[in-house]
């Protein structure tokens, strides 16, 4: 067999449907669009979310609406019981927590929450403290410094 003798298998090549080329073509007159209606007109199509004039689901469900607050601040949240494991260092900063793998994203601000108990005095530097965290740190003899 030579290259000029190669042929595709029977049925592999199929000519495209040519609509609107007369009744004898088999796709004439209505051109496969059916009779009347929106889908038979030129440019006649509906968007994906269209439900036939019924109140769309996106309007009916209040949780799908609303807005995203672009001024929302995201915080790295660390509890006091996580700070106890780092108690060998008397001063705790966001950089230290990042190095130890307690927090991942150093671009977010750090907030200390009051879950857990603390006995060792620590100097904790963070952007925010909860009331309970601040009182527990100060009760243990440490200080809670706010980073500005």
Image (cartoon, grey):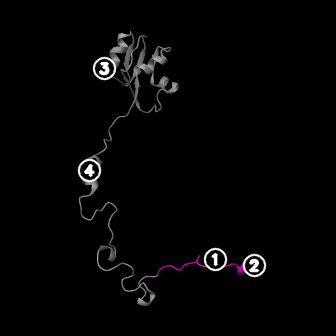
- Circle 4 residue: 61
User: For residue 19, which numbered disc appears in the image?
Assistant: none
Q: Which of labels 3 and 1 is toward the front? A: 1
Disc assigned to residue 2: 2
- Queried whether the magenta region covers residue 14, the answer comes back as yes
Q: Nearer the viewer, residue 16 or 108?
A: 16
Instruction: Give how far across and how far down residue 102 sits, in percent.
Output: 48, 26
Q: Quadrant of the N terminus?
A: bottom right
- N-terminal of the two: label 3 or label 2? 2
- Residue 43 in magenta stretch: no
**Alpha-carbon span between mark 3 and mark 1:** 79 Å
Dominant secondary-structure state across the stretch colored magenta: loop
**What separation in Å lies between label 1 and label 2 (alpha carbons)?**
16 Å
Pick the front one: 102 or 7: 7
The magenta stretch is 1-17
Q: Is the C terminus in the top left, top right, bottom left or bottom right quadrant? A: top left
Which residue is labeled 1 in the image? 9
> Judging from the image, what secondary structure is the residue with disc 3 in?
helix
Q: Residue 14 vs residue 46: left or right? A: right
């Amino acid at each position: 067999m030579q290259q000029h003798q190669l042929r595709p298998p029977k049925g592999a090549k199929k000519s495209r449907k040519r609509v609107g080329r007369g009744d004898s073509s088999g796709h004439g007159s209505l051109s496969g669009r059916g009779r009347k209606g929106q889908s038979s007109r030129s440019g006649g199509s509906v968007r994906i979310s269209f439900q036939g004039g019924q109140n769309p689901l996106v309007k009916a469900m209040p949780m799908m609406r609303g807005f995203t607050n672009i001024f929302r601040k995201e915080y790295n949240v660390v509890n006091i019981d996580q700070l106890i494991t780092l108690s060998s260092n008397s001063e705790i900063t966001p950089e230290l927590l990042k190095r130890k793998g307690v927090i991942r994203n150093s671009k977010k601000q750090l907030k200390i929450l009051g879950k857990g108990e603390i006995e060792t005095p620590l100097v904790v530097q963070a952007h925010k403290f909860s009331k309970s965290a601040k009182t527990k740190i100060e009760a243990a003899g440490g200080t809670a410094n706010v980073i500005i």
